[in-house]
Image (cartoon, helix red, strand yellow):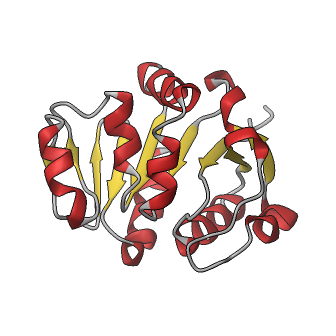
């Protein structure tokens, strides 16, 4: 029997938290995933510390248009942080609809740092335990979720983490959930 390859998409925008894109993309690739990296209009963007997305795409992923994502093509979506990128992503209706559909289909929806803002805007966090950057604790609670100060939190198909230093814990949680 042929093993089906898992597919992941990392959605980001200008000003992403550099290590929150670099490490997960490489780790997913290392775990055997096909990785797409989605930005609005498939635009090449730079991280908060000026890491060019182009460098990670060159070897580890394929750049795709975040406005044209189809949930049937993915097992997992990951929303990295950096306060600027998630704020940009949450303003794109097609991204929010994609997140809602991934959640509805019980596929893995993950976010960390400021990334839970996108999940909040998609309306999928009410009643869920959600980790995120301490600066968005009130946003998480005000959305009806329960802020959880843990390195990585799994609540159903939603997996979240607090901070760039928790990227290893987040990836362990994601990969354990997909086994």
Image-based side of 2 in relation to 33, left or right: right
User: In front here: 135 or 30?
Assistant: 135
Residue found at the far right of this picture: 58
Residue 81's place in the image compared with 147, above or below, is: below
Residue 91's place in the image compared with 68, above or below, is: below
Image-based side of 168 in relation to 49, left or right: left
Quarter that holds the N terminus: top right
Q: Which residue is at 26% across, 34% downward?
A: 125
How far across and down, in percent of the image, does residue 20 sit? 52, 67
How far across and down, in percent of the image, does residue 173 sit? 40, 57
Residue 103's place in the image compared with 76, above or below, is: above
Q: Which residue is at 28% across, 67% downward?
A: 151
User: In front here: 4 or 158?
Assistant: 158
How far across and down, in percent of the image, does residue 65 sit? 74, 37
Image-based side of 169 in relation to 76, left or right: left
Kindly tell me whether residue 6 is visible in this rendering: no
Residue 170's place in the image compared with 18, above or below, is: above
Kindly tell me whether residue 124 is visible in this rendering: yes
How far across and down, in percent of the image, does residue 24 sit? 58, 64
Q: Which residue is at 19% across, 30% downward?
A: 126
User: In front here: 169 or 70?
Assistant: 70
Rendered image quadrant of residue 118: top left
Q: Which residue is at 38% across, 78% downward?
A: 165
Please tell me how many numbered marks the rendered image carries.
Answer: 0
Rendered image quadrant of residue 133: bottom left
């Amino acid at each position: 029997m042929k093993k089906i390859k898992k597919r992941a998409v990392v959605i980001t925008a200008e000003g992403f938290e550099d290590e929150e894109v670099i490490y997960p993309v490489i780790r997913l690739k290392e775990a055997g995933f096909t990785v797409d990296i989605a930005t609005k209009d498939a635009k090449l963007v730079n991280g908060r510390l000026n890491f060019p997305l182009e460098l990670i795409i060159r070897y580890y992923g394929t750049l795709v248009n975040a406005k044209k994502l189809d949930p049937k093509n993915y097992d997992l979506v990951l929303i990295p942080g950096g306060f600027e990128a998630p704020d940009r992503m949450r303003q794109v209706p097609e991204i929010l609809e994609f997140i809602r559909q991934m959640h509805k289909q019980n596929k893995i929806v993950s976010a960390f740092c400021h990334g839970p803002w996108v999940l909040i805007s998609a309306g999928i966090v009410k009643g869920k335990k959600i980790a995120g950057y301490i600066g968005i604790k009130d946003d998480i609670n005000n959305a009806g979720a329960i802020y959880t100060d843990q390195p990585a939190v799994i609540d159903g198909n939603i997996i979240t983490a607090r901070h760039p230093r928790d990227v290893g814990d987040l990836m362990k949680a994601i990969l354990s959930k997909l086994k």
